[in-house]
Image (cartoon, rainbow, N blue to C red):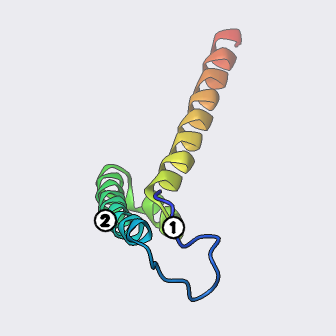
Amino acid sequence: MPINPAVGKPTGWSPTSLTELADQTAYKTAIKKWNDNDVIVRQQIAVLIPDSLFIQLLSLPTAKEFFNILNGVGKLLETWGKAGKKSLVSS
């Protein structure tokens, strides 16, 4: 996620130098692109997973967090699958 150049500045700060103006403009462009891409990724995830699972992810703020949760679920299911195979073999 792009970092806002206003972070760490006093409340009400606005760019005054050409460099600050350029940084602020670059940030606005970068954050718009980042948000657009985030929406696209969320839509792709929504298409690929069941609605019941997607509903659980709606409160997460970014697609990256969607991925982190889904990746954790996948690893958990993989672990359960391996444990189930071991118990079947030992039976």
Which mark is drawn over residue 63?
A: none
Which mark is drawn over residue 29?
A: 2
83 versus 17 height, above or below:
above
Q: Nearer the viewer, mark 2 or mark 1?
A: 1
Location of residue 74 in the rendering, given as x and y in whole percent from the top left corner: 53, 37
Q: Amino acid at mark 1?
A: Pro
Cα separation, mark 2 vs mark 1, equals 13 Å
Q: Residue furthest top?
A: 90
Looking at the image, residue 68 sits to the left or right of residue 88; the answer is left
Please report the residue visible at 29 percent of the width from the left and 63 percent of the height from the top: 36
Please report the residue visible at 57 percent of the width from the left and 43 percent of the height from the top: 73
Location of residue 41 in the rendering, given as x and y in whole percent from the top left corner: 33, 54
Q: Which badge, 2 or 1, comes first in the chain's sequence?
A: 1
Looking at the image, residue 71 sits to the left or right of residue 88; the answer is left
Element at label 2: helix
Residue position marked by numbered label 1 in the rendering: 5
Q: How many numbered tags mark residues here? A: 2
Q: Dot 1: few (<14), some (14–19), or many (≥20) neighbours within 10 Å? A: some
Location of residue 72 in the rendering, given as x and y in whole percent from the top left corner: 59, 41
Q: Nearer the viewer, residue 21 or 29?
A: 21
Q: Dot 2: few (<14), some (14–19), or many (≥20) neighbours within 10 Å? A: few
**Quadrant of image for the C terminus:** top right
Q: Residue furthest bottom?
A: 12
Q: Residue furthest front?
A: 17
Q: Quadrant of residue 75?
A: top right
Q: Nearer the viewer, residue 24 or 80?
A: 24
Looking at the image, residue 47 sits to the left or right of residue 20; the answer is left
Element at label 1: loop
Please report the residue visible at 53 percent of the width from the left and 65 percent of the height from the top: 60
